[in-house]
Image (cartoon, grey):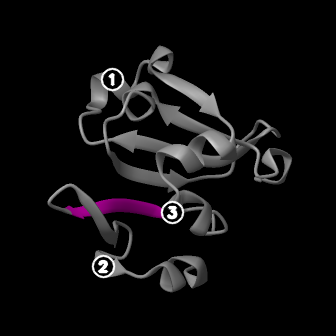
């Protein structure tokens, strides 16, 4: 069982919530104490979509786990983490660090500063 209180809320695109695969996730410090700083976007979220706050919902860790289990594995990544999710034949295969312009492992994500 996941202790939602240990994680706080994730800001999630409604497209991701509705089944579109995660394409990007980034973490920044939140001004809202109940949020953990993670934002999760889908492959079809364009600038117009992202700029409309009505297109996002706040999800608990348990709900995010059902959508993308690996988010809880990278949860402790530092603020400033900016990742593109890589896929092969619709299966998540890894991450691309957009800040450092390279493929990264979960271990590297958790150690990056």
In the rendered structure, which segment of residues is drawn in magenta? 81-87
Q: Viewer-proximal residue, 5 or 97?
A: 5
Instruction: Check whether the beta carbons of the residues at disc 3 and disc 1 lie within 8 A of each other.
Output: no
- Measured in 3D between alpha carbons, the distance from the residue under mark 3 to the one under mark 1, in whole angstroms, is 24 Å
Mark number, residue 70: 3
Task: Say which residue label 1 marks.
Answer: 49
Q: Earlier in the sequence, mark 3 or mark 1?
A: 1
Task: Say which residue label 2 marks.
Answer: 103
Within-10-Å neighbours for mark 1: few <14, some 14–19, many 20+: some
Q: Earlier in the sequence, mark 1 or mark 2?
A: 1
Q: Residue at x 49, y 85 (%)?
A: 108
Q: Position of residue 37 (x, y in %)?
A: 65, 48
Q: Is residue 72 above or below residue 33?
A: below
| Picture mark count | 3
Pair 3/1: label in front = 3
Q: Residue at x 60, y 52 (%)?
A: 28
Q: Position of residue 54 (x, y in %)?
A: 49, 14
Q: Examine the structure image and report whether residue 26 is included in the region drawn in magenta.
A: no
Q: Circle 3 — which element?
A: helix
Q: Viewer-proximal residue, 62 or 102?
A: 62
Q: Circle 2 — which element?
A: strand
Q: Residue at x 67, y 68 (%)?
A: 76
Q: Is residue 62 above or below residue 95?
A: above
- Measured in 3D between alpha carbons, the distance from the residue under mark 1 to the one under mark 2, in whole angstroms, is 27 Å
Q: Is residue 105 left or right of residue 74?
A: left
Q: Examine the structure image and report whether residue 82 is included in the region drawn in magenta.
A: yes
Snapshot quadrant of residue 72: bottom right
Q: Residue at x 29, y 79 (%)?
A: 102
């Amino acid at each position: 069982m996941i202790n939602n209180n240990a994680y706080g809320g994730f800001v999630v695109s409604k497209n991701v919530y509705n089944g579109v695969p995660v394409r990007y996730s980034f973490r920044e410090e939140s001004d809202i104490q109940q949020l953990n700083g993670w934002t999760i976007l889908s492959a079809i979220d364009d600038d117009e979509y992202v700029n409309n706050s009505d297109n996002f919902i706040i999800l608990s860790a348990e709900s995010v786990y059902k959508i993308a289990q690996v988010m809880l594995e990278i949860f402790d990544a530092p603020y400033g983490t900016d990742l593109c999710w890589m896929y092969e034949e619709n299966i998540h295969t890894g991450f691309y660090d957009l800040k450092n312009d390279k493929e990264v492992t979960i271990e590297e994500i958790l150690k990056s500063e």
